[in-house]
Every structure is written in C-alpha cells, then in structure tokens.
Image (tube, helix red, strand yellow):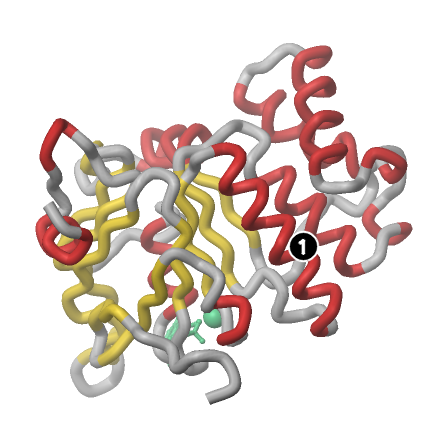
Amino acid sequence: MDAETKAETGTASEGEVPALFLSRVARWYPQREGRLEILKSVDFAVWPGEIVALVAPSGTGKSTLLHVAGLLERPDDGEVYVGGEPTAHMDDAGRTRLRREEIGFVYQFHHLLPEFSALENVVMPQIIRGLRKAEARERARELLAFLGLADRLSHRPAELSGGEQQRVALARAVANAPRVLLADEPTGNLDPQTSAHVFQTLVSLVRASGLAAVIATHNHELARRMDRCVSIRDGRVVELALPPAGA
Ligand SMILES: Nc1ncnc2c1ncn2[C@@H]1O[C@H](COP(=O)(O)OP(=O)(O)O)[C@@H](O)[C@H]1O
Ligand SMILES: [Mg+2]
C-alpha cells in the first residue's frame, strides 16, 4: 500500500498501525455568531519512524492540531488514535495516562522547571511514570549525553543557552520512550545556527529511537530534510511539496 493510501485510510497491510491517526477531526471555537472552525475534517496518519514537517502560516491551526493530537485538548468531532487505540471514549485520567506513556511534547519555549537541574528535569517525568530513581537517572544521563549535554547535567535552565534548554526539553519529551513526538515550533525562538543544530539533534534522536514525529516549523530549509511535509488548508491536512532549496 502506498503512503498516500495509507494516509487516507489510516490502515496498512501486515498489521502495521499508524503511531498517530486523526480521523475526521474537527475543532472549533464558539463565537457570538456560529463557530470559528479551525480544523474542519482532518485525516492525518503518521507512521512509526516517520518525521513529518507541519508547515503552515501563523493562525492556521498548527498548535491546535498538535494539542488535539497530543491529547491536550479534545476534538469537537472525530477520533484520535494513538498506536491504533481510540481515545474519544477515555476519561481525562485515561487520556493523561496514555499521553504520559505514548506522547512527548516540545514547545517553542522550553517550559523546564527553573529550580531543577537539567538532569532532574529529565528524571522527573520518569519518576511520575513510576520508574525507580536510579534507572531514571541513568536514562536521563544517556539521553543528555546523546544530545551533547554530558557536561551540563547539573546546570539549571537559567544557566543554559537557548539551544541547550531546547535540547534538555527534547530529552525530557522522549524520556519515557514515547511512540509519538510532537514539537510546536521547537526552534522558533532560536537564532538560525542554533536552530539548525537543535534540529539536527532532534532528527538524529528520532532516527535513533524509531519514534514518529510531527514538527511544526516555519523553516522551509529544515522542513525539507524531513520525510514528508504537510500543511493545513481550509481546516484540513494536505500534503505539501516544498519548492527545492534556492528556488
Ligand atoms: N481559545 C481560543 N478561542 C478562540 N479562538 C482561538 C482560541 N485558540 C486559538 N484560537 C484561534 O485559532 C486559530 C488557530 O490558532 P493556532 O492553532 O494557535 O494557530 P498556529 O499555531 O498555526 O499559529 C487562530 O486564528 C486563533 O486565533
Ligand atoms: Mg502555534
């Protein structure tokens, strides 16, 4: 089955299941007159090991889409499947558990805990999930070393550069080995060179761990390096062919 058919149906041969699948997802905000429809009918599948760039102008619904996909918000209609598991019927506790186990989120601003070290920030979600402290610390050390931060473990966020803070946020997001990584303009706040570096690190990490990733970005140059680009048009997710570099 080709990628397009897979994206449309969210099913594949050989029992393969999308890491993430949004089916006819709608999200709107009530207005005085009618609704402000942001997502009208989103069908969107992301497969294990795939990195997808989400490139769309500001205000088109990228954050809304990622929040719904990440179970941070409920859709007003449609269904979100994580690893083939439908989520609409779940109560908030069930969704929180699933999010903790299966989804990593990186924001434009790092949202690290300011009073805690880089290491502790990456240990924390693992402890919440129920891992023993020694194991959590070992995993955090490995991840931070992979991201080039082996000599920054005891630094607090304020003692790190913007790029370093985002790499710690990245380590935190994947600390529990999620199935899906969602990143909302993760380098939008960084200078171009730092942005490229964080990006490269992100891609290496995703490649090494085989998780699925959706990365919202305005940066076409970086988006081109991903497996696939999509956009949001008229409240739907559409495939996007970016013009070649320099065009
Ligand atoms: N709580 C809300 N109430 C009403 N409108 C909202 C709310 N949150 C977002 N919006 C609107 O939804 C649209 C999409 O927002 P967003 O998903 O943040 O876009 P993007 O991330 O692509 O910039 C915007 O026009 C925004 O004004
Ligand atoms: Mg946004």
Q: Nearer the viewer, residue 66 or 13?
A: 13
**Picture residue at 23% right of the left edge, 70% below the top:** 238
Q: What residue type is labelled 1?
A: His
- In percent of width and height, residue 152 lies at 87, 39
Query: Taking 175 as reference, is 113 above or below it?
Result: below
Q: Is residue 54 left or right of residue 139?
A: left
- In the image, residue 1 sits, relative to residue 92, either above or below, namely below
Q: Where is residue 28 in the image (x, y as percent from the top left)?
A: 24, 70
Residue at image coords 43%, 37%: 211
Say what secondary structure mark 1 lies in: loop
Image quadrant assignment for residue 139: top right
Pick the front one: 154 or 112:
154
Residue 163, horizontal then vertical, whole percent: 75, 57
| Residue carrying label 1 | 110
Q: Residue 120, located in which quarter of the rendered image?
A: top right
Residue 77 visible in rendering: no
For mark 1, does the 10 Å Cα neighbourhood hold few (<14), some (14 to 19), or many (20 or more) residues? many
| Residue at the image position 66 percent from the left and 29 percent from the top | 124
